[in-house]
Amino acid sequence: MKSSFTLRIIIIGLLTCLMSVPLFFASETINSRADYSRSTIASVSRDWGGAQALGAPMLIVPVTAQVTRKSRVDVVDPATGLVQLDPASGKPLQKVVSRTVTEHRMPVFVAPTTYDLTVDSVTEERHRGLFQVPVYKSKAVANLTFAKSDVTAALAQGEVAHFDNAKFRMRIDVMRSLRGEATLTADAASIPLQATAEDRGRGLSAQIGTKAFGGPLTLTLGFNGAQRFNVSPYGTVSRIKMRSDWPHPSFFGAFLPDSSTITDAGFESQWTIPHLSLGLPLVAREDTAVKIAHAAQFGVSYYQPNDFYQKAFRAGRYGLLFVALTFMTVLLIERRGDRPVHPVQYLFIGLAQSLFVVLMVALAEQVGFTAAYAIASGATIGLITLYAFAALKLGARTLALFGALSVTYAILYMILQAEDLALLAGSIFAFAALAVAMFATSNETWDGVDRPDWRWLKRKSATDA
């Protein structure tokens, strides 16, 4: 019984499964390089300023109250200075004394009635070794107004708000990232800023007094950052606008933009957030800064789209399929000759394809993804084609193998480039490859006798009739 073709299919199936081992190690190599890249990006980002976040701006107004306290004191004889005694009991005589004291109460934390923030960012790339890290320089301008009536409404009976000692505060996550301008102005007058390191976080503060209520305040900050920028809205209405030359923003957090324009030249996004959506009071007798950061913080990530490590890892996912298709192509080509391909030769072809992914990553770190893919795929196709012609003695049939490999790697490139359609493209390609393999082997039988085509079914049906 002639069963060599069936046996070879079984052997090729086992060899394909065996190729998962080198493909696994190739994937581990890619993951290792990707981890090293991520650690480098994190290190450069941290040195530059890190992920910056602007907290909620607020006014803190001290509050006091006049309190009458009563206490019992010994009665002292003014002539002798001695404590007088009760003749009946012999104990010191006492009297009740009332005195009025000033008591400090919990201050009033007030949100601005309007909070208009504009953040303009310019990105640049920093290099460390083989890696490029996107960072940004930003200028933030905030216009704020506060109302005295908000403070007065929060006072209990007998309490007094000391507007002269009112303090402005805004939390900032990374103080060392501040660069250039850091000013606060009210009525064209500059108000000194100072750094604070309170229990609830670091930031800026200023003893602003009654100037907080005389007109709009303007806070201007310049800072560095990397990877992300966050902001916490806090006000009766918060209007926030972000502009940058980064063409790949990824918005996240409690609120997505109301409107956003993204082009190759950058993005511009706007948010309008009413205080009702925050679910927090605008005036409180406790510090709500942390609650606001947890409940309402949002921002933008300076996203690196589909970098070559992601592409290489996805290429590795298709590696076993490509090896199987190549093995099947070689099998269908060589079975028409007199010299079958040895299993070791199949292993060499599989190893060449396994090394393709590692070679592509190594080159991409030097010359970029597109050039690296062209060189790595060209080298892999050339090596397998030359090996098929010189070692496997496929002759003119080598052109068919060359064409199949070229189409396969061209399709893989399109799959890797199509970030959003990668799953769809990969699924269609896998289905089409399976269909071709099914019809290419449709004439095979267990006994090794070829059937020319399916027309024998029609002839057999006609004979039976």
Image: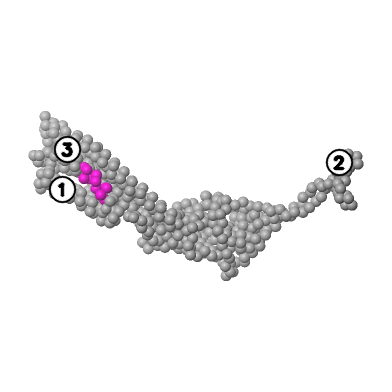
Residue highlighted by disc 3:
343
- Which amino acid, by three-letter code, is at mark 3? Pro
- Residue 90 lies, in percent from the top left, at 88, 40
* Residue 2 appears left or right of 438: left
Q: Is residue 274 visible?
A: no
Assign a secondary structure to mark 2.
loop
Q: Mark on residue 91?
A: 2
- Residue 79 lies, in percent from the top left, at 89, 52
Please give the name of the residue rendered at 51% of the width and 60% of the height, measured from the top-left corner: 239
- Residue 455 lies, in percent from the top left, at 13, 38
Task: State whether residue 92 is above or below residue 202.
Answer: above
38 is within the stretch colored magenta: no
Pointer 2 or 1: first along the chain: 2
Residue highlighted by disc 1:
385
Please give the name of the residue rendered at 16% of the width and 35% of the height, measured from the top-left corner: 8
Circle 2/circle 1 CB separation < 8 Å: no
Local packing at callout 2 (Cα closer than 10 Å; few below 14, some 14-19, many 20+) is few
Magenta segment range? 350-360
Q: Residue furthest right?
A: 87
Task: Give the spatial CA distance, label 2 vs label 3.
Answer: 113 Å
Task: State whether residue 11 is above or below residue 33.
Answer: above
Q: Nearer the viewer, residue 453 or 225?
A: 225
Task: Give the spatial CA distance, label 1 vs label 3.
Answer: 17 Å
- Which amino acid, by three-letter code, is at mark 1? Thr
Q: Is residue 194 visible?
A: yes
